[in-house]
Image (cartoon, rainbow, N blue to C red):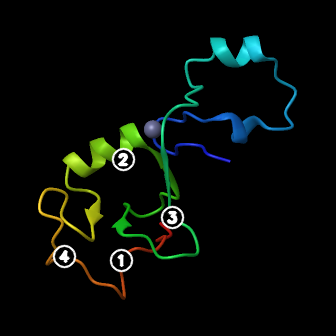
Amino acid sequence: MSFCEKCYCYDDSYVEGEDITDDQLENDPKYEPHRYYYWHGDIQEDYQMPKGYECLCESCFGDLLGEGKIIEKYEWKTNKLNPKWNDDTMGWFVPI
Ligand SMILES: [Zn+2]
């Protein structure tokens, strides 16, 4: 399931099995099935989200990235290893 913990939007998998009609979904402004959702789970990712975030939609991910609150392992423009990156502490879910 995908559910953004910042703006609270979600996709189909989040409401799977719930008693919601397609009309209700379509009318819900928080229903964003076409966004990409970024996760922090048990596997290491090549980005570090702010503490406490486990899932973010691409829109919020982009906002936080712009604010410098997300650190990417590889710098977006150059694709070079980010000097701030630390494999031991980054790329994992960090509880609040
Ligand atoms: Zn979001």
- Location of residue 49 (image quadrant): bottom left
Q: Which residue is mark 3?
A: 40
The label nearer to you, 2 versus 4, is 4
Earlier in the chain: of badge 1 and badge 3, it is 3
Q: Is residue 35 left or right of residue 42?
A: left
Residue at coordinates 47% horizontally, 76% vertically from top-left?
A: 44
Q: Is residue 22 left or right of residue 29?
A: right
Residue at coordinates 18% horizontally, 64% vertically from top-left?
A: 75
Tell me how far mark 4 sits from mark 3, CA to CA: 20 Å
| Badge 4: residue crowd in 10 Å (few <14, some 14–19, many ≥20) | few
Q: In the structure shown, which secondary structural element does the residue marked by tag 3 occupy? A: loop
Tell me how far mark 3 sits from mark 2, CA to CA: 12 Å
Q: Which residue is mark 2?
A: 61
Residue at coordinates 33% horizontally, 85% vertically from top-left?
A: 87
Earlier in the chain: of badge 2 and badge 1, it is 2
Earlier in the chain: of badge 4 and badge 3, it is 3
Q: Is mark 2 within 8 Å of ligand 1?
A: yes
Q: Which residue is mark 1?
A: 90
Earlier in the chain: of badge 2 and badge 4, it is 2
Q: Is residue 79 left or right of residue 93?
A: left
The amino acid type of the residue labelled 1 equals: Met
The label nearer to you, 4 versus 3, is 4
Does the residue at mark 4 contact the one at mark 3 (Cβ under 8 Å)? no
Q: Which residue is mark 4?
A: 81
The amino acid type of the residue labelled 3 equals: His
